Image: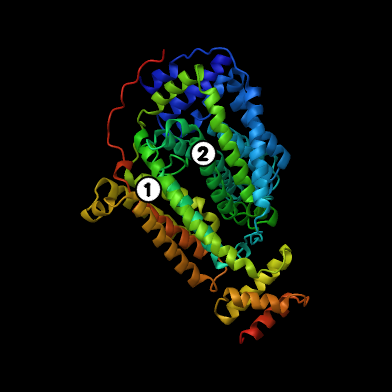
């Protein structure tokens, strides 16, 4: 049967079945699962927050955060290229693959996703470790601190490690300093 | 009337589309199990489109990421069926073109097209990845589980639901991390900067989006099991037979690589700082796609030897190399620039390494005739 013939085939329907019953049962189970997931997530530590992504430091507080995003972007690109557009409707390769080949490419993509998950998880772990020196939970304070650290890093020509960032944090906590004061304190601490 | 609508939406459109564009045909067909509930099957696609228009009228913001509920609703509709996600996204896009007041305000003519319409369309394509591509990827993973010989028959339903939930959740998490960067053209092409309102919701609450969609995916598996019997099952068999036909569109390797390169460059344009970088990225992806095609069709001895290494091992090596290269690139640039060039370079290098090491000779089809299919009873 060609696609045209198939499109003209007529399939006769039987009577309808109760949708509401099935939907309610699954909604109840879904709610239970959702509640468990909420409880699990509420125990998770807050992640490093971003600003408006107008620049590199506005998007990523730590190198590990940027690495995580780069890894995820690489995965997304490889997935789109690997499925030859089977998933992404706009990419190259459409019209040249058989169904079996598409299935094979799905297998590739799924395997790539599983393996890349390990990479992303590793990067995420580094991110969490690197984020231990962030001040409080206030987003504005975080942004000010982060920008000050980045400016000091640029001025000094090197990156600070986790312990140094923690020392900076300990030094300025409770001092009610402005942005430039923080930068000067950091440069004073590390020989600028 | 209902019957005609069902036949047109779930059978004719997918199969006719698939003759030229198999991926689009699969997207239009996904969700056909809904015809088990005849009225629902008949009105689902128009309703999805209207839902998109309604959400556009309510939000009126072309940077749809500022409203996570809108994104979640559209994505959930897509999880129910990629066809519904496609129509809902189209509805949102068309609706926003009418209702949004922040598409290159003050611009007109070619300027409005370049600074407003084109980046808005890129944003809608980005949303389509979540509402259409992710459900199709979920179907691929589910098909793998169904065909896996190692999974006991009695456990396949549960495993399939878990696989669907994990794959959709992970894909949504990846999307929510990438979208804040990839939606930047909506702002920067218009000469402004991204707003915190448009970027922060996904970065802060992307995990919730992933969780909700994962639950939706598990529900979809169950709903499909309930619905895919009788009439819907027969429709599914007809669709499968039709979608298995080879596409009549044959694109030369170079043209295919060019199209793919342009698409990837546009997709990543939020990270690209100037025209020179855009040209380099375009050349990189055209070269990568062309090289992959050539290596698939005419693998030299070295590539043949590499292909004998099991795919998981190749992927592991590729990811390790990609991770190392990305780390080196980012470390070098970290204190030297404020642009997104390091992330762009790292992502491209990583994707290139993974893509080349994941080459499969079977990915390019030989010109074979489709197997004959029995008539539908």
Question: Picture coordinates of residue B80 (x, y %)?
Answer: 57, 32
- Note whether B215 is above or below A42 in the view shown: above
Q: In this view, which residue lies farthest toward the left?
A: B301
For the residues labelled 2 and 1, the Cα–Cα distance comes to 31 Å
- Note whether A82 is above or below B351 in the view shown: above
- Note whether B340 is above or below A174 in the view shown: above
Lower sequence index among marks 2 and 1 = 2
Give the residue pinned by disc 2. Answer: B164
Give the residue pinned by disc 1. Answer: B257
* Residue at the spot 24% in from the left edge and 54% down from the top edge: B305
Determine whether, in the image, residue B99 is placed left or right of residue B252.
right
Question: Picture coordinates of residue B50 (x, y %)?
Answer: 65, 30
Determine whether, in the image, residue B223 is placed left or right of residue A86.
right
Q: Chain of mark 1?
A: B
Question: Picture coordinates of residue B293 (x, y %)?
Answer: 32, 47
* Residue at the spot 58% in from the left edge and 76% down from the top edge: A160
Q: Chain of mark 2?
A: B
């Amino acid at each position: 049967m060609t696609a045209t013939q198939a499109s003209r085939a007529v399939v006769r329907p039987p009577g309808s079945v109760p949708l509401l019953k099935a939907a309610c049962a699954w909604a109840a189970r879904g709610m239970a699962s959702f509640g468990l997931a909420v409880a699990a997530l509420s125990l998770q530590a807050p992640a490093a927050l971003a600003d408006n992504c107008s620049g590199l430091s506005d998007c990523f507080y730590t190198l590990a955060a940027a690495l995580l995003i780069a890894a995820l972007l690489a995965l997304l690109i490889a997935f789109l290229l690997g499925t030859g557009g089977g998933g992404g409707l706009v990419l190259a390769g459409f019209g040249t693959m058989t169904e079996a080949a598409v299935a094979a490419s799905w297998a590739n993509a799924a395997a790539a996703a599983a393996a890349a998950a390990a990479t992303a998880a590793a990067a995420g772990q580094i991110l969490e470790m690197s984020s231990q020196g962030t001040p409080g939970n206030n987003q504005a304070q975080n942004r000010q601190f982060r920008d000050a650290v980045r400016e000091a890093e640029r001025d000094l020509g090197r990156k600070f490690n986790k312990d140094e960032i923690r020392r900076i944090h300990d030094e300025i906590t409770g001092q009610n300093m402005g942005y430039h004061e923080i930068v000067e304190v950091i440069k004073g601490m590390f020989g600028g | 009337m209902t019957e005609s609508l069902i036949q047109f939406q779930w059978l004719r459109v997918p199969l006719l589309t698939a003759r030229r564009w198999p991926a689009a045909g699969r997207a239009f067909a996904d969700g056909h199990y809904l015809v088990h509930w005849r009225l629902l099957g008949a009105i689902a696609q128009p309703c999805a489109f209207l839902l998109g228009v309604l959400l556009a009228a309510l939000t009126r913001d072309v940077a749809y990421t500022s409203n996570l509920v809108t994104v979640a609703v559209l994505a959930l509709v897509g999880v129910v069926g990629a066809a519904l996600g496609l129509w809902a996204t189209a509805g949102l896009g068309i609706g926003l073109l009418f209702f949004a007041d922040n598409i290159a305000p003050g611009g007109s003519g070619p300027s409005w097209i370049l600074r407003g319409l084109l980046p808005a369309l890129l944003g809608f394509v980005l949303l389509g990845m979540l509402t259409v591509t992710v459900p199709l990827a979920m179907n691929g993973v589910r098909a793998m589980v169904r065909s896996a010989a190692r999974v006991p028959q009695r456990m396949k339903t549960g495993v399939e639901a878990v696989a669907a939930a994990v794959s959709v959740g992970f894909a949504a998490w990846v999307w929510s991390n990438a979208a804040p960067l990839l939606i930047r053209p909506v702002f920067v092409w218009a000469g402004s900067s991204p707003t915190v309102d448009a970027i922060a919701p996904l970065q802060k609450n992307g995990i919730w989006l992933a969780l909700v969609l994962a639950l939706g995916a598990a529900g979809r598996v169950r709903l499909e099991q309930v619905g895919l019997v009788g009439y819907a099952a027969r429709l599914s068999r007809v669709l499968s037979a039709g979608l298995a036909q080879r596409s009549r569109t044959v694109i030369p390797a170079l043209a295919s690589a060019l199209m793919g390169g342009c698409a990837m460059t546009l997709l990543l344009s939020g990270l690209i700082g100037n025209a020179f970088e855009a040209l380099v990225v375009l050349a990189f992806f055209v070269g990568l796609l062309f090289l992959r095609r050539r290596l698939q069709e005419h693998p030299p001895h070295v590539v043949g030897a590499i292909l004998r290494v099991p795919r998981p091992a190749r992927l592991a090596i590729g990811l390790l190399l990609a991770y190392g290269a990305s780390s080196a690139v980012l470390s070098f640039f970290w204190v030297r620039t404020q642009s997104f060039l390091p992330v762009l370079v790292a992502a491209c290098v990583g994707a290139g390494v993974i893509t080349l090491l994941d080459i499969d000779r079977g990915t390019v089809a030989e010109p074979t005739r489709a197997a004959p299919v029995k008539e539908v009873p």
